[in-house]
Image (spheres, rainbow, N blue to C red):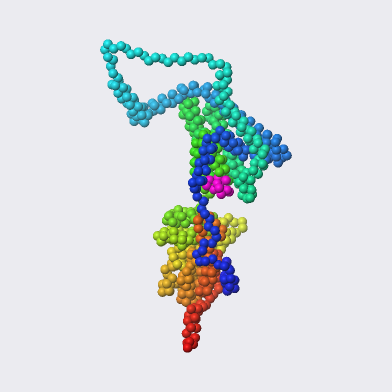
Amino acid sequence: MPDIDAATRDKRRSMPQAEPGMITGSPMQARRINLPTLATIAAVVAIIYFAQNVVLPLAIAMLITFALSPLATRLRRIGLPNLPAVLIVVTAAFVAIGMFILIVIWQLSTLTSNLPRFQANIVTKVESLVEAGSGSDGVIGRVSNMVESINNQIAARVEDEEEPPVAGAAPERPDPVLVEVVQDQSTLQMMQDIVLPLIGPIATTGLVVVVVVFMLLERAELRDRFIKLVGSNDLHRTTQVLQDAGRRVTQYLLVQLLVNIIYAVPIGVGLWFIGVPNALLWGLLTLVLRFIPYIGSVLSAAFPILLAFASSPDWSMVLWTIILFGVVETITSNAIEPWLYGSRTGVSPLAIIISAIFWTWLWGPLGLVMSTPLTVCLVVLGRHIPQFEVFDTLFGDEPVLEPHARLYQRLLAGDAIEATSRAEEALETMTLGEYYRDIGIPALLIAQNDQRRGVLTVEQQERVATTAQEIVIDLAEVVEEEREIASIGPKPEGEDAPELVENAVQDGDGHSVLCVGGKNSLDDVSAAMLAQIMRAEGATAEELAHTDLGLNRFREVAITGVDCVVLSFVDPSPMRASLLHIRRIKRAAPHLRVGVVIWNMPSKDEDGDMTVKPAQVADSKLDEALEIGADFAVRTLDEALRQSFSKEGPKPVEPVRLRQRRVELRARPAKA
């Protein structure tokens, strides 16, 4: 904000002002998981568990609809009516699925018929392993000896416990043999045994097909009904939910399918060249199993490796199979997937594992395959609808705390290492001044607000201040880097010069500033941050603690040649006694410009995770600082730098009104 002159002060006095320390704005209540929410979640889980015969087909149909909807929409755009477009897409999709299933069944039947001839290879390999470790020093030999010893001891114990037969006793009769009469099954009974088990899967498949067709035909109507159900009063938010959910789920399914095809084709071809039986089967299973997060690749590799072990008399086929999967997995994970995935699914890696366990418990193997897209839908709902916010908090990949709130939490814990590490990570994309403005100073403002509310003890305040000072010291080398980058100047055209930080201009060249903490240790940290920013801008800047503000002490430490002194406060409403240091400094060094910066929380920081927001700086406090004698009083970093580097001279110190009042009283004639 610009300087506050007399006219502005008079105008502001006529406006209603907030009381000192007042919490401005309505505080946002932190949303918590309460008992009704837990009861609702438990009831929903129970419903989808016990009603899985109904819910599972609907979930499968919903995911298939998400995947096929872009194709149907594309056919509509080229001129096909809605019904033919939907029928073409659904028919092609389910024909492909049916052919896939038939090929897998055919390959499995072929594999089953060839299993007996693999027995000799398995026995040969096992015998070779036993012979390799049959010595007394071999692991297999030791295990074999241990098992043999245990068997001998058990056999000896059983023989000792057997009672010898008594002389003259009749021999024991053998136990009767159970005889079961087997009758020939009728043709009707055989048909029932064959047909009835197939009715359930066929009916479920038919239900899925029908639901997918009608979802695609009525997708516009379903969209409108969902908007009405969720909230037609906020069409913007509801539309954003639908677009975000459709984009994320569709992108995940289609891109994952493309990645799996790119992965499965080299696997199938490679297994065929290696000689592993039924290479087509393992390629198709790899295509499906890689939909399972994290463990899908391991499962797809396990079966071909075991079959290579059984089908080859030597170990070459096993080694080549392991190498094949290792090479394809490395290329796919490190090159193809990062290239094809344009955006993240929005679910954290840990949440993917937890969701896989949860959906597998609910719906078995199908739940494992569907776990990631279903969790993506829940996260999207939680990101845009407050009632479902718990899912975004638990499973989302976005930080749940603002950067300044996270820094304050680390300061409270006294963890300077992690705080410095996160600061260095943030400084890769922002300047030092931007970091202190958007993260460092706001973290101190939250600490000061907690101190004013009485929830921050003196010990905790000192820990926060000490840890923050350690971070400032660790970031000192960043100052030199930014000054070095700024000294390079604009990048010459056509030359291979390093990229410059935006707005890296040394406005502080030739200026000498002294930054002083206003009242407490948190103010000292803010003064150190401000001085470091000024040094990064090219100025000569030093910092002092608030304990050096005593008149005698200040005269001892004040350095000649300083152009400006800046008092730094994180308290939005500092006491008048603290502001009176302005007048003392002006009297001790009339040639200095003395200013005050009372830090304000940046307006763009909503701070929605805090129960109580830090108070905003009242205009009356800035007016009070100017009345005491400050040359400038500001709230923001930009204004603090501009005023500190100003060429204007200091204002003269005005006489104290109280002393003038005393002189006037003494000059009055005494009453009779």
Image quarter where the N terminus lies is: bottom right
> In this picture, is 107 found above or below 613?
above
- Asked if one can make out residue 294 in the rendered structure from this viewpoint, the answer is no
Which sits in the foreground, 295 or 476? 295
Residue drawn at the location 40% of the way across and 60% of the way down: 459
> In this picture, is 72 found above or below 392?
above
Chief SS of the magenta region: helix
> In this picture, is 313 found above or below 247?
above
Extreme residue in the front direction: 672
Instruction: Find residue 590 and report its horizontal and vertical position in percent.
Output: 49, 76
Residue 390 covered by magenta stretch? yes
- Asked if one can make out residue 66 in the rendered structure from this viewpoint, the answer is yes
Residue drawn at the location 48% of the way across and 87% of the way down: 671
Instruction: Find residue 444 and report its horizontal and vertical position in percent.
Output: 48, 60
Extreme residue in the right direction: 79
Extreme residue in the bottom direction: 672
Instruction: Find residue 100 and report its horizontal and vertical position in percent.
Output: 59, 30
Which sits in the foreground, 113 or 624? 624
Residue drawn at the location 53% of the way across and 49% of the way down: 398
Which sits in the foreground, 48 or 395? 48
Instruction: Find residue 440 and report its horizontal and vertical position in percent.
Output: 49, 59
Residue drawn at the location 41% of the way across and 27% of the way down: 129
> In this picture, is 326 found above or below 478?
above
Residue 148 relative to residue 105: left or right: left
Residue 154 covered by magenta stretch? no
Instruction: Specify start and end residues of the magenta stretch as a single range.
Output: 379-391
Residue 556 relative to residue 289: left or right: left
Q: Determine which quarter of the picture holds residue 160.
A: top left
Figure disc tally: 0
Extreme residue in the left direction: 167
Which sits in the foreground, 390 or 287? 390
